[in-house]
Structures are given as structure tokens and as C-alpha cells.
Image: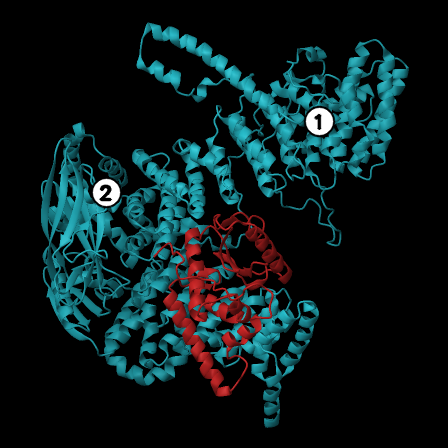
């Protein structure tokens, strides 16, 4: 079982948090902070597993994470999950984001956390892996987005149509977060299995 | 109204959307909180509007704020509103918000039940999907109960997208509503063989998750999972299954035996590291479960260890980590195989990666021996120094203690060294493991009598230098060691060199700053010391010193009497009064020492941690019954003071009497002894260990250890434990030298090569004798202690409720709750949406019949009813049209009936268990190929004879087969080989029916679950002979690939029949236009495939080859050749073997379960062409006939009523094949329908062929 999926940036700012078990908002924030603390002090070339210890769940749980450009993707899983499998799953997740956002970067996640949630929902459900096939995931996500578009077109709502690529690129210049437009994912990254 | 809408949409133009909110927050870095609070106010305004779009937008923003840590539960009702929007866009927003912030105590959840039910049955699959996803995050027991039935219906939805989600969410439903498990389980089990890989994977996922917690209930699924494991190509599924097997093997060692070979094959063949790793893990689990029994598994261990070493040596840190992790599992049962890689593991201790260092530390635990313990601990101590102030250091500390104390200090040869290590560890500042060190000190001092003298001296030094340890008291856990030090000095005060000095140290004013529980121990043990001091001093005739000591006590104790800590206060005031009384006596020149020391007479022996738990409850005693009626609840329970050392408890609670009245004392002591003697909770001191009247002259006898104890603890330079390492080395060298001398003498007498080896090699474990005699006092257990029961399970574990026997037949009462009171509002399951009503109306009848038929308990009733059913069935066709008309009127009733009985009855327990036994009682497929092959060579299976003999020989079968199996799986030694072979052949003949049976029969009956009430199945095997010569035999089985419509997998078992080694086997086939062997990319169309293993003499192994087939309607034969090298000791020759691979149409069929409703639909659809065939002279039981068709031709029974059965199968390209099999006397007629007439004709021919061979 996957207990939580967290995405935060190099400064510990949460970009997505999905807990498959209930915690209070404060505890969630604390978990995010502590996880960031644990993960961020690790070198780039060390292993991607961390024993979570007391953080969530206790000794049966592990933190499995990957670091892409400015973001950390952290999965907290128990011993029924294959460690390498989850690493691959993170890879599939990021690749899927990359396909859905076309060269995904942190800004995409900042402004469209709802969309990231929708993509994630096609991969993991209630803490269990639902689908690992990227094409299938993208197909389902696209189909749902199409539905949404057709609904919105008929009602002429300005709000939800994403013109985001253009919007935030104009904004990006005035930010001092560092380069948020660094693509998270190069196609050359390794994929272990399959 | 219209105006309002217009106004609303204008307002909306100015609303912030999520992007605006994010941008706003980013632009208000300085006053983020303030900005967000204004945003929340805006959101509250938006939520008040009627416009759902505005609400949805607000909820969407709230979801974002929730992620930032803001509590949004106040908007729960608005979230429900958005969830119930008819627009998918808003619904999705609502469900996302709900999944992020709803939980069991959210009260509005109960409002959602109907909405969710509506969404679940929505015609739009994404509405259903979104509802399922949301529900998976916030399902409550109530929701689970109310919706279980709806979700279960969705498990058979036409869309795989919905099916897989429904299957997956069932796990959550089970957790919240355990009663649903049994009714839902049969369908879940079916989904294991769902044609869609995603659904299949979800089902595997759920069952694995269930089985992980309660493995024993899922053992009966092992054959099914085994089949999946050997057929699936999806790594995710494989990993899950292999992990599951890891959980199952401890319960059933025979399963492990069956698994080893296929897993070994996977280890050799897979390129996916994740799969390889899980295989290794499960092989390890198997080996652990087999730790006795199979003699030849050392090869498997070697394989695992080798593979793990490769992982550990890999530059990829992840593999390194996992390699170490798995290695630690082997360590538990096969420490020897791991110990040989000590170098590698020690190397990992220096890795820059902390995770890896921690794993290596874990492994060290099993690496130590008497010989290397000191060396390893020395290395660890160096790491401790380096790792200042990290959690890693704490980890190191616990590991050092673990390593040293493991299995009763087995590896410690010198306890002085260990005590020094513990003392050194007290220098660690800020560690939270002070109590760990303390309990070690206590444990060693109590249990190792010989070390007490040394320990007491060390502890006295510690007490003297207490100020060094207690730098900043509050957050320093290390002061816990003072607890141990004080107690040891007090309890064993007769060993103290200068008790007066220690007493003085214990009464220093600074002690009052220590935590209360430590002070209490100080006070108590000061009294003990006082007794000892008195005894020494009274011997010296000079009475003034004794009085001075009393005076010291009287002066210092009031400080503790004022303590805020109750325990300290109580003890101090008691002792103070005691001392005052003593002083009075002393002034009268009365000798008191003996009486005072009698207060502390007797020795405490260590008690086993579980001793108290193990005391049997006397008969007739009900511990849960109230002695007095409980007081009113308002009385608050006082919090128990924290007992740090539970071991010490009996001592604390033992009342200490302050009166010195001799008679009274004696009386009480007597009474106490009496009481203790009768009290099983008390540890009885052996009379010999009474130290009351012992002479204290032993002080002089303390072996003087050359350590300068007066030096403060923080000495720069050499830590003192190092001295011991050197000393120990010297001691050992001396010993060795002596031994060598002796050896030399011996060698002179008989010169053997053995001596040399001994000389150069490292000394063995036994050679090292402990430095001083160590008598470890074992922990005491009460008399008639209960046998150990490891009931350490957490009673709050939600999985406990899921420990449910799944094989028991369903009782009538076990139904999922259905909404029965509103029959008018029919919720149609999406499956049936738009289907003909007649179908629906027929369903319940069939289901009824199915269920009733298989309830054995009410057999009598059943018989009657099934006759009725039969009648109904007969009339079915006639009734069809009527049904069509009647359908609508009937529907509401029918629906409710149907939903309550969606459950397919499970198979019976006993049959299931014996099936499992059958399945398990053989060796894995590859290793019993000899048998299978022999059989195949002899001819096709012989059912008549088999059905007669198999049951008869059943009872003694497992033993025999096991014996045989060990023989056949062992690699035979050349000399004995021929003899053995002959023997085995005989045996094989004797038993070959079983093997047949267990090859397939067991598996099959588990799958179909129809035959359990009748005689056991005849043996069957699908492996048939492919080709054979004097070197090698090939048998094969051909099966369609579940996942790919154009693929067929040919499993070939190669068996080496000769005395030579067979290697470089190449498998090649002449492709036809229609059928091609899949070759790896880059190889030519005529290249052979290398078989991925070699065969030592007498060994067999299985390889799989994938073929692509275009048209499957016709059977086909392919010519092929196997080339191989026969390697003898002196020569090697090339050989080849030709064969013909026969692709029957049957091999394109895949066993697919089918519901009777779907089956009926199929038959009515009119797309199918019919054909029929008659078989004459069949005299086997009907269920054997069915099982045969199921097994050899990959059908599944849809429904069976007496001598009539409907069966279903599907080709890999999706052709439906339906059979109606009827029997009367010796004639069997099969009416068949299929959408591809040619295929059908061929399949029927093949069925005919099968039965003509009987």
C-alpha cells in the first residue's frame, strides 16, 4: 500500500500532497516538513530509499523518492510494494506529466495542481497502484479533459480554460524562485524495467 | 430568476480562479497569511451563491489551500453540493476536494450515500470512475455497508476501466465492512482471470494485500496464483504474486518446494531487476520455511547470495541497498552463507549513504563471532565518534548493544571489556538511549556473577564523576546510567573497595537535580551502602566512625525528604527515621550492623520478561469479573508513574519495614518468606546465595585490572576498551601458542596435511575460551508457565477483522445489504443497461438454481428444488417469449432478488483442502517431468484405471511422492545412477496416476469448483511428448497468451536422459506464413533461440517460447529442430533432435469464466453458428468428462444441472465458444456454438479425439 504521495520543491514548498490515510492538516504539514528535511539533506548519488521511522506508519514504511530538477517526488509505502517497482512508478508518473503538460516544469505543477491530482488518480487509487501503462493513463486523462472541455464550451466559462503556458511565462521573469521552468524530465532518463 | 443568473455570471467574471489565487499568493510573499485570509473570506462569499460554477471554483481553491495546511472542513457541505453537480467538471472538483479532506468523522459524509450510489450507476463511465476514486479515499463503515453491493455489481461492468477501479476499491470496503469479504470473494477470485490485464492486476493487488495480513485463508488460491505466475508476462502482477508466495510459504513448506524451480528460472531469465529482486526475496522466504527438510537447497542459497552480491557490488546505490536488505533475511537462517561476504559488508559501513550504512549495520548483527566481536565493535566505536549528534549515532549505539548482547551474550569472551564499552558509551552526549545502556549494565552485573567486582568498581567511578555525565540534565538521556550505577553499587556493595566514598558521592546535594526515579534509587541504595559501611566499621572496634557515618546520613537525607517527588520523599523519610533510630542504638554501644544488613538480605534473580504473563490462571478464577462494583466513572484514573525498568518493579513495590524491632522484623521476614514461597510471582532466592553473613574479606581478592579508574572519563587518547582488545589478542595468542605446541607434538606423531591447514587458518570459534568463567544466570520463569504464545498482534489492527475463512460455503444470512424497501426505484447496474429485459428476468432463476445446487447442507431440500429448477430450465425456451412480455412487470421484484444473490457460491472446504494437498504433493512441474514424460510416452492419460486407483492410494500418497521427489530432484551421483533410475521407474509406474492427477487435476477442480461433491478427479496432464532420443526428451504444452491476441506460449520441458552434460541447446522452428516463432530483435528469421539453461545429467528444466499466430481457426504443425552439445569429461559432440510442434485449435482457447447471464445473452445474440457432435461409449462419470473438457480444452463450466452442463471458452482472438453437453447412458452429445464455424469444427474434432483415446 502507498500511504502518501508528496511533491515538494527544493525549498520544501508543497506542490502536491496526497494522503491515503487521514491526518489533520497540521500533521500533514509536519509530515511534509519532516520528509523534506530528511530527503533534502541527502546527496544526489545516494540511494532513493529512506526508512521513514516514526514519521508515518512506523518501521514497515519506507520513503521512496526521486529528485527531478527542482522537485522531489516522494512516495511513502509499506513493505507490500516493490521498491524498484515504485521507483519505476514515479518515473511513469513524471513521464506522464511530461506528456500531459508538454515538457513539464515546476510551474505547471504550481498552477495546475488539480490536473496533477487527476493524472495521479488514474495511476494510484486509495493507496493501491491502479495503472502503470502510460498510454492507458494518458488516454483516460485525455478523455476526461475532453469531456470537461465540451461541458465548459457550452457554458462559456472563462475560468478553467488553461492558457497557462503563455500566462505564467510572462510572470516568470519577475520571480526569484530560481528557474522554475527547468524541464523536470529529460527523455534520456533511465527506465529500469520493461 | 433570470436576472439572478445573469448577475451571477457577471460576478463570476471577477472571481479569482485557482491560477489567480496561486499567483496572488506568490505575489504576497510578505503577508501571505493575511492575503490568504482575505481569499478565504472571498471563497466564503462565493460559496453562498447559488451558481454551481462559482461554488466549484471556490471548492477548487479550497483544495489548494488545504494542501498549504489550512483547515477547510467548514466547507464540507459545499463540497458535497459540488459533488452532486450533474456536470462532470464540477463533480470531479467536488470529489477531489472530498478525497483530500473528508474522513470518518466528517458528519456530512452520510449525506453522500445516495449521491455516490447514483454516480456509481451513471451511464457515463467517468462519473463512475471519479466517484470510485473519491470513495476510495473517504469510505466509512457506513458507506461501505451501503455501497458494497453496488460496487460488487460494478466488478462485472462491461468497461475494464470501471472493473479495475471497482475491484481495487473492494479492498477498502473489506477493511471498513469485513462482513462483505465472504460474499464478494468469489467474484474477486474470478477477476484474477479477467481478460483485461488491468483488472487482473487489480485483483491480484487486492488479494495480495488481503493475504499479506491473513495468509492462511488464502492458501487454497495457491494453485491459481501459481498458474498466473507461470503464464503472466506483466511484471507488476508477477512481483505481487511472488511477494504473495513469500507470505504463503511459511505456512505450507510443500508450496515452497514447488516454487523453487520456477523462481530459479525467473531469476536466470528475467532482465527486470525489480522482478529478479522479488524472486530472490521469495526464494529466501521459501528457504527459510524449508530450513529443515530439503537437503539440496544449498544451491539455491548460493544462487541468492551470489545474485545479492552482484546487487551490492553494483554502482547503483538502490541495488546496493536492496541487496543488503535481502541479505539480512538470509542471515537469520543461513548465517554461514552470508558470513563469507563479510568483507563486502564491512566495506558498506564506510559508504557515504546513511541508508546503506544502516542496512550494513543490520547485517553486522549476524556477522559477529567470538573471534571478531571486539574488532567489529572497535570499528563501530570509531564510527560513533565520527557521527556526533546524528540519529545515525543513536542507531550505532543500539546496534553495538544488540550485537554484544545477542543470544545471551554468546559472543562476549571478556565481560570486563564489555563493561568498559558500556562505560565509554556513557560519554555520548544527547543520546536518547541512556536507559538502554543502563539496562545492559544492570543485566550484565546481575547475570554475570564473576563480573560484579569489576562492574561495581566501574560504577563507583561513574557515580563519583556523575557531574561529567549530567552536564545539562534536562534533555540528557544519558543520566539514566546513574540509575544503574547507583543500584549496582548498592546491591553489590560488598564488592566496593571504598564504600564510604561511594556513599558520600551518592548523597551529594547535586543529586537532587537528577530525575525523580533516579533519586529514589539513590536514596534506597544509599541505605544499602550504609548497611555495608556499618558492617565494615563495626568490625574495626572504633565506634566513632560508624557514628560519623550515621551522622552523614542524617545530615544529607533531609534534602531528599523535601523532594517534590513522592517516591523519593517517602523512601528518604523512612530511611531517615531508620538511621536516627540506629544512631540512638549506636550511642548506647549496641551493635546494629547485622540487623541493618538483614534489611537488604537476599539476592534478586533476573526474571524473564514474559514471566508474569506466563503464570497460568488458576481454574475458576475470572480475572475480568469485578471484585467490587466499579465506582462511578467520574473518578479519574491516576496516571501511572512511568516505570522505566519493569524488571525492577518487584523490588520497588516490596515494602521495606523501617522498624528495627528485632522480633517484629523476624516475624515479618518469616511471614514474607512464607508468602513468597506460596506466591508464584516471587522469585525465590536460593539459600546458598544469601549473603547476609558472608565475610567481606573478598575485597582483597578482586582481580586488579590495570585501568586507571581515577582518571576522569574524558581522557584524550586511547579509549580504555582498546586495551582489552590488545590484552585479548595477547591472551589468544598465548593460547594459540600453547595449542600449537600441543599440535606440533601430535603432528610429530602422525604427520597429516590437516595440521598445516590448522596452523595457517584462522582459529575456529570453539578454540576461543572466555577470559574468565562466566556464569550467566538464566532468567527465571514461574512454575507451570504456559507454553509460549506469541500473541503480540495489535488488537486494533483493522486487518484482524478480515481474518475470515473464505472456503466455507456461504450461509444464507451472509448477503450484502441491499436496499429492499424501495423496490420501485430500481437501480440498474450499468452492465445491464440497455440490455433486453428478458435476460434480466431469467437471471435470478439460474442463479437460484446454481446457488441452491451447491449448498450441500440442505441436500434434501436441494434435490427437490433442483428438480423444480430443471423443469423450469426445460421450459426455458418455451417461456422465453413470455418472459419478454412479462419482463417489465416482473422487473422490480426480480432486481431486488438478483442483487441479493449476486454471489457465486464458493467451493466446499474439504474438497478445496484436499485439492490443495494434491496440487502440493508433487514436485514442481519441471522436476516431475520425468513422471509426466513417462506418462506421455506411454500414451495419453488412462482415466478409467486412474479413477479407480487414485482414491484408493490417496492416503499414503503424500509421503511416497515426497520421498520420490527428493530423489528425483536430487542430482544423482554417477555411480548409483542406474540403480536408482530403475528403482524410480518402478515407483513411477506405481504412482503415476497421482502425478497425472496432481499435475492438473487438483488445480482444475479448484478453478471450477463444480466437482467437489463427487469422487476425486482422474489424473490429467496437458504435457505431451514432443520428441525424444537417447540424450534428451522434450514434452510440451501450448497455451494462448492471455494478454495478446496473436500470441501462443509453448512451454517445453527438456529432460536430460543421458550421463553427459547437455549445453548450448538451440531451439529452432521453420516458420510458416501463419505462425512464427518470436525471436529477439536483430536476429534473422531462421535463427534458433538459445535455451537459457544447461542440463546436468538427469535434470530437467522448462523453457518457454512465444509464437505469433495470425489465423487461429485451423490447427497447424510446425517442423523444428533442437541442436545441442553433449559434453562428456573427455569429448563433446553436436547432436540434434527433430520434432513437430502441433498447434491445435484448443491451444488457442483460454479458460475464461463466464456468468450464466452473459452466457444466455451470448446465445441469444444470434451471431453464433451451431454445430454438434456425439460421443459414444463414454463410461466415465459426468463430472470427469466435464473436468476433462475443462482441462484439456480450456473450457469453464458455466452451469451444470445433473447430466447437462453449459460450458464456455474464448479464443485468444476473442471468439466465443459455447458448449451444451448432455449425457444419457454412454452417449454424450455436445451442441456447440461459436462465431467462427471452422474453429468450432476443429475444436469439436479435437474433443472427440480426446475422448476416443480413453
Q: Inspect this view and state whether residue B994 appears.
A: no
Tell whether A184 sits left or right of B652. left
**Letter of the chain that mark 1 sits on in the rendering:** B
* Helix, strand or loop under label 1: helix
Of A67 and B517, which appears nearest the observer? A67
- Which residue is the site of mark 1? B462
Tell whether B64 sits left or right of B490. left
Tell whether B337 sits left or right of B481. left
* Helix, strand or loop under label 2: helix
- Which residue is the site of mark 2? B927
Tell me, by letter, which chain the rendering colours red: A
Residue at figure coordinates x 34%, y 57% from the top left: A194
Position of residue B1243 relative to residue B252, above or below, is below
Of B174 and B106, which appears nearest the observer? B106
Residue at figure coordinates x 16%, y 58% from the top left: B1085
**Letter of the chain that mark 2 sits on in the rendering:** B
Amino acid at each position: 500500500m502507498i500511504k502518501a504521495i508528496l511533491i515538494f520543491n527544493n525549498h520544501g514548498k508543497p506542490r502536491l500532497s496526497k494522503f491515503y490515510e487521514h491526518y489533520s492538516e497540521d500533521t500533514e504539514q509536519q509530515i511534509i516538513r519532516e520528509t523534506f528535511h530528511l530527503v533534502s539533506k541527502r546527496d544526489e548519488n545516494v540511494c532513493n530509499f529512506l526508512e521513514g521511522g516514526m514519521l508515518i506508519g512506523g518501521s514497515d514504511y519506507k520513503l521512496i523518492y526521486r529528485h527531478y530538477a527542482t522537485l522531489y517526488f516522494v512516495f511513502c509505502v509499506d513493505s507490500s510494494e516493490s521498491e524498484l517497482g515504485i521507483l519505476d512508478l514515479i518515473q511513469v508518473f513524471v513521464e506522464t506529466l511530461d506528456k500531459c503538460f508538454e515538457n513539464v516544469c515546476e510551474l505547471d505543477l504550481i498552477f495546475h495542481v488539480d490536473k496533477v491530482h487527476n493524472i495521479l488518480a488514474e495511476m494510484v487509487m486509495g493507496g493501491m497502484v491502479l495503472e502503470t501503462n502510460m498510454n492507458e493513463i494518458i488516454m483516460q486523462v485525455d478523455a476526461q479533459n475532453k469531456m470537461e472541455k465540451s461541458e465548459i464550451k457550452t457554458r462559456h466559462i472563462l475560468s478553467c480554460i488553461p492558457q497557462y503556458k503563455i500566462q505564467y511565462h510572462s510572470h516568470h521573469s519577475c520571480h526569484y524562485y530560481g528557474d522554475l521552468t527547468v524541464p523536470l524530465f529529460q527523455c534520456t532518463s533511465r527506465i529500469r524495467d520493461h | 430568476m433570470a436576472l439572478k443568473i445573469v448577475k451571477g455570471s457577471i460576478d463570476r467574471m471577477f472571481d479569482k480562479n485557482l491560477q489567480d489565487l496561486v499567483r496572488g499568493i506568490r505575489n504576497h510573499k510578505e503577508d501571505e497569511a493575511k492575503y490568504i485570509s482575505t481569499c478565504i473570506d472571498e471563497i466564503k462569499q462565493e460559496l453562498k451563491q447559488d451558481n454551481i460554477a462559482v461554488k466549484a471554483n471556490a471548492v477548487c481553491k479550497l483544495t489548494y489551500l488545504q494542501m498549504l495546511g489550512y483547515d477547510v472542513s467548514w466547507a464540507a457541505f459545499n463540497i458535497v453540493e459540488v459533488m452532486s453537480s450533474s456536470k462532470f467538471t464540477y463533480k470531479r472538483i467536488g470529489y477531489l476536494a472530498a478525497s483530500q479532506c473528508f474522513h470518518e468523522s466528517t458528519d456530512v459524509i452520510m449525506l453522500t450515500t445516495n449521491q455516490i450510489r447514483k454516480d456509481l450507476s451513471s451511464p457515463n463511465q467517468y462519473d463512475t470512475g471519479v466517484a470510485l476514486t473519491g470513495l476510495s479515499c473517504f469510505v466509512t463503515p457506513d458507506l461501505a455497508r451501503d455501497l458494497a453491493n453496488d460496487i460488487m455489481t460494478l466488478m462485472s461492468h462491461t468497461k475494464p476501466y470501471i472493473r479495475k477501479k471497482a475491484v481495487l476499491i473492494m479492498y477498502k470496503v473489506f477493511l471498513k465492512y469485513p462482513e462483505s469479504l465472504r460474499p464478494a470473494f468469489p467474484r474477486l477470485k474470478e477477476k484474477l482471470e479477467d481478460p483485461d490485464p488491468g483488472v487482473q492486476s487489480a485483483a491480484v493487488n487486492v488479494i495480495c494485500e488481503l493475504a499479506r495480513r491473513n495468509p492462511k485463508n488464502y492458501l487454497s488460491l495457491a494453485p491459481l496464483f501459481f498458474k498466473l505466475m507461470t503464464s503472466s508476462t506483466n511484471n507488476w502482477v508477477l512481483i505481487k504474486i511472488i511477494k504473495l508466495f513469500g507470505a504463503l510459504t511459511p505456512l505450507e513448506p510443500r508450496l515452497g518446494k514447488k516454487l523453487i524451480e520456477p523462481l530459479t528460472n525467473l531469476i536466470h531469465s528475467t532482465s527486470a531487476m525489480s522482478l529478479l529482486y522479488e524472486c530472490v526475496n521469495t526464494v529466501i522466504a521459501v528457504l527459510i520455511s524449508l530450513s529443515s527438510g530439503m537437503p539440496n537447497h544449498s544451491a539455491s542459497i548460493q544462487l541468492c547470495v551470489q545474485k545479492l552480491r552482484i546487487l551490492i557490488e553494483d554502482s547503483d546505490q538502490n541495488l546496493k541497498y536492496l541487496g543488503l536488505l535481502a541479505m539480512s533475511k538470509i542471515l537469520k537462517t543461513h548465517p554461514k552463507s552470508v558470513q563469507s561476504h563479510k568483507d563486502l559488508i564491512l566495506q558498506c559501513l564506510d559508504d557515504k549513504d546513511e541508508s546503506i550504512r544502516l542496512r550494513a549495520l543490520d547485517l553486522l548483527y549476524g556477522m559477529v563471532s567470538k573471534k571478531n566481536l571486539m574488532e567489529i565493535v572497535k570499528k563501530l566505536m570509531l564510527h560513533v565518534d565520527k557521527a556526533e549528534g546524528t540519529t545515525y549515532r543513536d542507531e550505532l549505539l543500539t546496534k553495538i548493544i544488540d550485537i554484544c548482547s545477542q543470544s545471551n551474550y554468546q559472543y562476549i569472551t571478556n565481560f570486563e571489556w564489555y563493561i568498559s564499552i558500556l562505560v565509554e558509551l556513557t560519554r555520548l552526549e544527547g543520546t536518547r538511549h541512556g536507559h538502554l545502556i543502563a539496562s545492559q549494565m544492570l543485566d550484565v552485573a546481575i547475570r554475570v556473577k564473576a563480573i560484579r567486582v569489576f562492574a561495581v568498581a566501574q560504577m563507583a567511578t561513574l557515580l563519583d564523576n556523575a557531574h561529567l555525565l549530567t552536564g545539562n540534565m534536562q534533555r540528557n538521556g544519558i543520566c539514566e546510567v546513574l540509575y544503574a550505577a547507583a543500584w549496582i553499587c548498592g546491591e553489590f556493595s560488598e564488592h566496593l573497595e571504598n564504600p564510604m566514598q561511594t556513599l558520600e558521592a551518592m548523597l551529594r546535594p547535586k543529586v537532587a537535580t537528577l530525575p525523580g526515579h533516579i533519586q529514589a534509587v539513590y536514596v534506597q541504595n544509599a541505605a544499602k551502602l550504609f548497611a555495608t559501611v556499618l558492617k565494615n566499621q563495626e568490625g574495626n572496634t572504633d565506634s566513632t566512625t560508624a557514628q560519623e557515618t550515621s551522622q552523614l546520613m542524617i545530615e544529607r537525607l533531609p534534602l531528599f525528604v523535601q523532594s517534590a517527588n513522592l517516591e523519593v520523599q517517602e523512601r528518604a523519610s523512612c530511611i531517615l527515621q531508620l538511621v536516627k533510630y540506629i544512631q540512638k542504638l549506636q550511642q548506647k554501644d549496641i551493635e546494629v550492623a547485622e540487623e541493618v544488613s538483614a534489611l537488604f538480605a537476599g539476592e534478586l534473580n533476573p526474571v524473564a520478561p514474559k514471566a508474569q504473563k506466563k503464570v497460568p490462571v488458576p481454574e475458576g478464577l475470572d480475572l475480568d469479573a469485578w471484585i467490587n462494583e466499579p465506582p462511578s466513572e467520574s473518578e479519574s484514573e491516576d496516571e501511572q508513574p512511568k516505570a522505566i525498568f519493569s524488571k525492577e518493579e518487584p523490588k520497588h513495590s516490596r515494602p521495606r519495614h523501617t522498624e528495627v524491632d528485632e522480633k517484629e522484623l523476624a516475624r515479618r521476614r518469616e511471614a514474607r518468606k512464607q508468602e513468597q514461597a506460596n506466591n508464584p510471582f516471587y522469585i525465590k532466592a536460593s539459600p546458598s546465595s544469601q549473603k547476609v553473613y558472608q565475610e567481606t574479606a573478598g575485597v582483597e581478592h578482586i582481580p586488579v585490572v590495570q585501568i586507571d579508574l581515577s582518571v576522569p572519563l574524558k581522557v584524550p587518547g586511547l579509549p580504555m576498551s582498546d586495551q582489552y582488545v590488545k590484552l585479548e589478542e595477547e591472551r589468544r595468542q598465548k593460547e594459540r601458542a600453547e595449542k600449537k605446541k600441543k599440535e606440533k607434538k601430535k603432528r610429530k606423531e602422525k604427520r597429516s596435511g590437516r595440521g598445516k591447514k590448522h596452523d595457517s587458518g584462522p582459529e575456529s570459534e570453539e578454540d576461543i575460551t572466555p577470559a574468565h568463567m562466566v556464569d550467566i544466570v538464566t532468567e527465571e520463569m514461574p512454575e507451570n508457565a504456559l507454553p509460549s504464545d506469541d500473541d503480540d498482534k495489535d488488537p486494533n489492527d483493522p486487518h484482524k477483522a478480515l481474518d475470515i475463512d473464505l472456503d466455507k460455503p456461504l450461509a444464507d444470512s451472509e448477503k450484502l445489504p441491499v436496499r429492499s424497501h424501495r423496490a420501485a426505484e430500481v437501480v440498474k447496474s450499468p452492465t445491464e443497461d440497455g440490455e433486453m429485459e428478458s435476460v434480466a428476468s431469467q437471471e435470478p432463476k439460474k442463479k437460484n438454481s446454481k446457488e441452491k445446487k451447491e449448498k450441500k447442507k440442505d441436500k434434501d431440500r436441494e434435490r427437490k428444488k433442483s428438480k423444480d429448477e430443471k423443469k423450469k430450465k426445460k421450459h426455458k425456451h418455451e417461456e422465453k417469449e413470455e418472459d419478454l412480455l412479462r419482463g417489465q412487470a416482473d422487473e422490480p421484484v426480480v432486481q431486488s432478488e438478483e442483487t441479493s444473490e449476486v454471489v457465486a457460491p464458493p467451493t466446499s472446504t474439504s474438497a478445496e483442502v484436499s485439492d490443495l494437498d494434491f496440487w502440493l504433493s508433487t514436485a514442481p512441474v519441471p522436476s516431475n517431468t520425468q513422471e509426466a514424460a513417462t506418462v506421455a510416452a506411454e500414451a495419453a492419460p488412462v482415466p478409467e484405471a486412474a479413477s479407480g486407483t487414485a482414491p484408493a492410494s490417496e492416503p499414503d500418497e503424500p509421503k511416497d511422492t515426497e520421498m520420490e521427489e527428493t530423489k528425483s530432484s536430487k542430482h544423482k551421483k554417477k555411480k548409483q545412477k542406474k540403480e536408482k533410475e530403475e528403482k524410480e521407474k518402478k515407483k513411477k509406474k506405481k504412482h503415476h496416476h497421482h502425478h497425472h492427477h496432481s499435475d492438473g487435476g487438483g488445480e482444475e477442480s479448484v478453478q471450477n469448483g463444480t466437482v467437489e461433491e463427487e469422487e476425486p478427479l482422474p489424473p490429467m496432464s496437458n504435457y505431451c511428448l514432443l520428441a525424444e532420443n537417447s540424450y534428451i526428451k522434450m514434452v510440451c504444452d501450448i497455451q494462448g497468451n492471455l494478454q495478446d491476441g496473436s500470441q501462443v506460449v509453448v512451454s517445453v520441458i527438456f529432460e536430460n536422459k543421458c550421463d553427459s552434460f547437455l549445453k548450448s541447446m538451440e531451439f529452432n522452428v521453420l516458420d510458416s506464413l501463419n505462425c512464427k516463432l518470436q525471436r529477439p530483435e536483430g536476429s534473422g528469421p531462421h535463427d534458433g533461440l538459445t535455451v537459457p539453461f544447461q542440463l546436468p545429467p538427469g535434470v530437467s528444466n522448462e523453457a518457454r517460447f512465444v509464437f505469433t499466430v495470425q489465423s487461429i481457426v485451423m490447427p497447424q504443425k510446425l517442423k523444428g529442430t533442437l541442436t545441442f552439445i553433449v559434453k562428456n569429461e573427455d569429448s563433446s559432440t553436436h547432436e540434434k533432435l527433430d520434432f513437430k510442434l502441433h498447434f491445435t485449435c484448443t491451444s488457442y482457447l483460454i479458460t475464461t469464466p463466464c456468468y450464466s447471464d452473459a452466457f444466455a445473452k451470448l446465445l441469444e445474440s444470434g451471431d453464433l453458428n451451431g454445430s454438434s457432435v456425439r460421443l459414444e461409449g463414454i463410461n466415465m462419470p459426468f463430472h470427469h468428462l466435464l473436468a476433462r473438457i475443462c482441462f484439456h480444452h480450456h473450457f469453464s463450466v458455466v452451469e451444470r444441472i445433473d447430466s447437462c452442463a453449459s460450458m464456455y471458452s474464448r479464443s485468444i482472438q476473442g471468439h466465443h465458444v459455447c458448449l451444451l453437453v448432455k449425457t444419457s447412458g454412454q452417449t454424450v452429445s455436445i451442441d456447440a456454438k461459436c462465431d467462427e464455424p471452422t474453429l468450432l469444427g476443429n475444436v469439436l474434432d479435437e474433443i472427440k479425439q480426446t475422448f476416443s483415446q480413453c
